[in-house]
Image: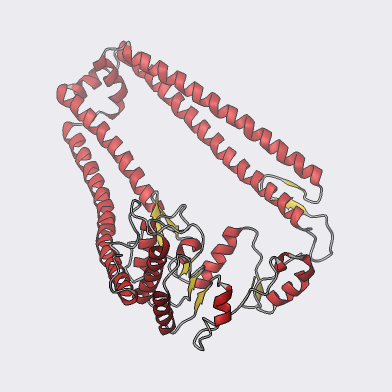
Amino acid sequence: MKSEGLLKIFDTDSELRSFIISLIGFIPKVQKKGIDVTIDLTTFYEMFFIGQDKRNPSSLIGNGYFKKDDFKSMLCQLGGIKRPNFDSDDELETKQMIRELKVQHKSLVKKLSLLSKTPSLALLTSKTADHDNARIVRSKAKLLTEEINEKRKQRNRETIRIEKLTVLKNELNSLNRNMDLGEIVCFDCGSANIVFKNRNIEFDVSNKEVRSEIIKSISDNIADKNEALLSFSHEINILQIRLRELEKTTPPDLFQLAMFSDDIRTEEQYDSDAHKTLLKIQELENRQLNVKKGFNDTKTQCVEFIDRIVTSMNEYRDAIDPNARLHFNDLFSKSNNVFSGSDEQEYYYCRTMAINDVLSHKFPIIFDAFRDGELSSNKEEKMLDEFIGLGKQVILTSTLKKEEYNSGKYSDKRITSIDYSMHPNGKLLSPDYNEKFRNSINSFGGLIILS
C-alpha cells in the first residue's frame, strides 16, 4: 500500500488489517477470556455494511470469534460509553499475587495452629535442637527439600533455554521464507554473501544448506532438552515421594518440629504476620472488585444505549409500514424466532439506519442484494427516500428483471444508477486485462501489485 508517500508491504492479512485499523482511527476492544482484544474489521463493518451471504438476524453475519454481545459493546464504546481500562498483564499479576499470599497465609495459620497446640514449642525447639532424632529428621528433610528446589531451578533453566532456541529457530525459518520471497543483498556492494549473527550463532545466510543444517541442529537440541525436562520432572517426583515417606514414618510433632525449627517465632509474631498478609489479600481482591464494578456500571449504561437503538429501529419500521406486525425487542432476534423474507430485509434496514441515527457515524451505508426478500414497491420507495435523506453515500446492489430495465424503474435524478449487466463475467480474472487493471489501481495511489 502507498500511504503518505511511503510504500508499505504486508506479508499477512493480519498486518494489512492492522494498517487499515490505523487509518480508521478508534476501533473498540472487548474482553475475551480475560484479555482485551481489538474488534476485527468484519464485525466493525457490520454496523454499516450488510452483505448478501450468511445473513442471520439472531447473530452476526460474520459469526465466528466475535459474538453479538461483542458487537453491542463495540456500539456502546463508539457511542461514547467509556469502558474501564482492562490491563490483562496487571490482572494476571494480581491473581498470581493473591494466590501466593493465600499460600503464605495458610502456612502462617498452620504454624500458628501448631504453636497454639504446643505452647512450649519455641522452648521445646531450643531444648531439643540437639536431640539426635530431631536433628537426623531435620537434616534429611532439609536435604530433600534443597534437592527438590535445585532440580526445579535446573528444570526452569532448561525451559528458558528451550524458549530461546525456539525463538532462534523461528527467526531462521522466517529468514528462509524471506529468502524465498526475494533475494537479500548488501546495499553497499550488492554482494549476496550476507552473514546472520546474534549472541548464539553466526553463519552465511546465502548458503541454504548451512541454514538447513543449523535449523536441524537447533531442532535436535530442543528435542534433547525436552527429554531433559522429563528427566528432571521424574527426579523431582522421586524426591517428593521420599519426602512424603519420611513424613509418614516420623511422629507428626517431631516432623513439624524438624521442618519449622528454623522459623519458630512467638504466637504474637505469627498472628501479626497472618493479619498483615490477610489485609494484603483483601486489598488486592477489592481492587479486582472495583474493576468488576466498573464493568457492571458500564453494562447498565450499555443496556440503556442499546435500548435507544432498538427504539429507533421500531421508529424506522413504523415509517415504512405503520401496520407492521414486526416488532423489535433487541438488536438481534431470538434464535427460535428468526426473521425471513421481507421481514429479514426490513430488520437489516431498520438496524442499519438506527445505528447510523444514534451514532451519526461517518461511514457510508452499503447493502448488497438490497431487494433480496421481495420487498413491496411501496416499502422500497420509502426506504430509498430515507436513504437519500441521510445526506451521505449509500451503495445498494440488486439484480433487476428485464422489464424493470425497460421501464426505467430507477431513473431517478437523485439516484446514480450503474448498470453492470453489459460487463462480461470474470473479466478482471482474465490475464488479458492484468496490465490495465494494475494501471487503474495505481491511479488511486493505493494498492501496489508486486509481480
- Residue at left 59%, top 63%? 16
Q: Position of residue 183 (x, y in %)?
A: 79, 58
Residue 85 higher or lower than 121, as above or below: below
Residue at left 45%, top 78%? 362
Instruction: Name the side, left or right, on which 70 lies relative to 303.
Output: right
State whether residue 183 is above or below residue 198. Answer: below
Image position of 184 (left or right of 76): right
Can residue 119 be seen here? The reply is no
Q: Nearer the viewer, residue 38 or 111?
A: 38
Q: Is residue 172 left or right of residue 191?
A: left
Does residue 151 show up? Answer: yes
Would you say 179 lies left or right of 119 here? right
Residue 181: x, y in percent? Answer: 74, 56
- Check the image and report above or below for 149 versus 245: below
Find residue 438 and report its image quarter: bottom right
Residue 372 percent across, percent down from the top left: 48, 66
Quarter of the figure that contains the N terminus: bottom right
Quarter of the image for residue 299 reads: bottom left
Q: Nearer the viewer, residue 46 or 121?
A: 46
Residue 56 placed where, x, y %?
A: 43, 57
Query: How many labels, in total?
Result: 0
- Pick the quarter of the image with the C terminus: bottom right
Q: Quadrant of residue 248?
A: top left
Write the residue at 45% across / 25% down: 148
Q: Nearer the viewer, residue 199 or 381?
A: 381
